[in-house]
Amino acid sequence: MRLNRISVRSVFLSEQGIRVGWKALLFMGLSITLRMGTRPALGSLIVLSQSEPNPPSHALIRESWLVLLVFIATWVMARIEKRSVFSFGYTGEARLIRFVSGVAWGFFSLSALVGVMWQSGSLVFDGFSLDGAAAWKYGIEWALMFTLVGIAEESELRGYLQYTLSRGIGFWWSALILSMVFVLLHAFLAGESALGLFQTGALGMVFCLSLWYTKSLFWAVGFHAGWDWSESYFYGAPDSGMLIQGHLFTTHPVGDPLWSGGMTGPEGSLLSILLPILMAVGMWLWWGKRNSSATFP
């Protein structure tokens, strides 16, 4: 009997406490329970459409809600492990610089893609749709909203889960698995395409690479925000098939969706596949050569 108790105990516990796999499952179970349990309340407040442009007020409520839920799930697991809730990607040096540089990378990467598509005739500019105070108002609101998107998605997939699974199966296996989960979550969006999903997975690995080098999520959150803001607000293009209310420019795709991205948006274009490769090389040149013996965490 005592031997059986020891055997059962060893399935769930190690010398370091709860085993890594069970902690990851506990976090995911808690996250899913929180989402499912609060969905009716959220649905009574807002309804987001995938076919009509969404106002920033509704999107801000939804993303604030999701940030709160992932914070609660992370806080519970941090309490179990007797660690700070911020220890899973939100500590380290140069946090503001990491975030701002991530925003810049995201904006200029998407802008470079849009520029190439425009020059090749796959994307057409229809002119400005906002000016004056309205442009500033929507620009600030969407910047805040997309920052919340970056915090929610990066914290959920590359925060606690990445840190925890890395202790069990290694950083890069964890990165690959969680990037595949990132793809699966986007697969439920009606406007996504196969190329768009591939780009999503590739960007997920790039975000993991930034975590490997910087030991924080600030750059990834910034890039996420800068990319989405420039795609949706600045250029007025679809983002995974979704359009927003209030964007600076208006653009539309032209020709074969393989090159134009179609209704998925620029990230659904075959031209976008080169971006993650170039970004990974840039990271290695900027961060990798400075810290060739980088380990995680």
Image (spheres, rainbow, N blue to C red):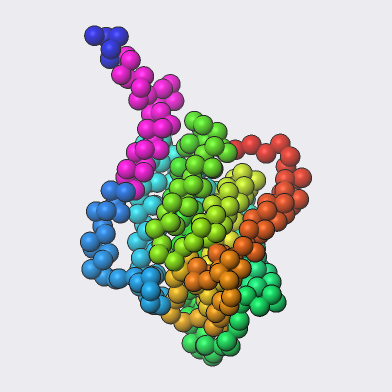
User: How many numbered circles are shown?
Assistant: 0
**Residue at point 66%, 59% (across, down):** 275
Residue 212 sits above or below residue 264 on the image: above
Residue 278 drawn at (x, y percent): 70, 56
Given residues 275 and 81, the one toward you in this image is 275
In magenta stretch: residue 81: no
Q: What residue is rendered at 55% in x and 69% in y?
A: 257
Which stretch appears magenta? Answer: 6-31
Image quadrant where one finds the N terminus: top left
Q: Quadrant of the C terminus?
A: top right
In this view of the protein, can residue 274 be seen by the observer?
yes
Q: Main secondary structure of the magenta part?
A: helix
Point out residue 110 in the picture as x, y percentages from the top left corner: 62, 68
- When asked about the image quadrant of residue 2, the answer is top left
Q: State the residue at coordinates (32%, 45%).
A: 30
Image: 164 above or below 16: below
What residue is at 58 percent from the left and 77 percent from the top? Answer: 254
Q: Is residue 241 or residue 42 the one in the foreground?
A: 241
Residue 67: where, in percent of width, then height? 40, 58
Q: Toward the viewer: 256 or 61?
A: 256
| Residue 239 visible here | no
Residue at the farthest front position = 256
> Which residue occupies the extreme bottom position in the image?
132
Is residue 16 on the magenta stretch?
A: yes
* Location of residue 128 by image quarter: bottom right
Q: Position of residue 184 (x, y in %)?
A: 43, 51
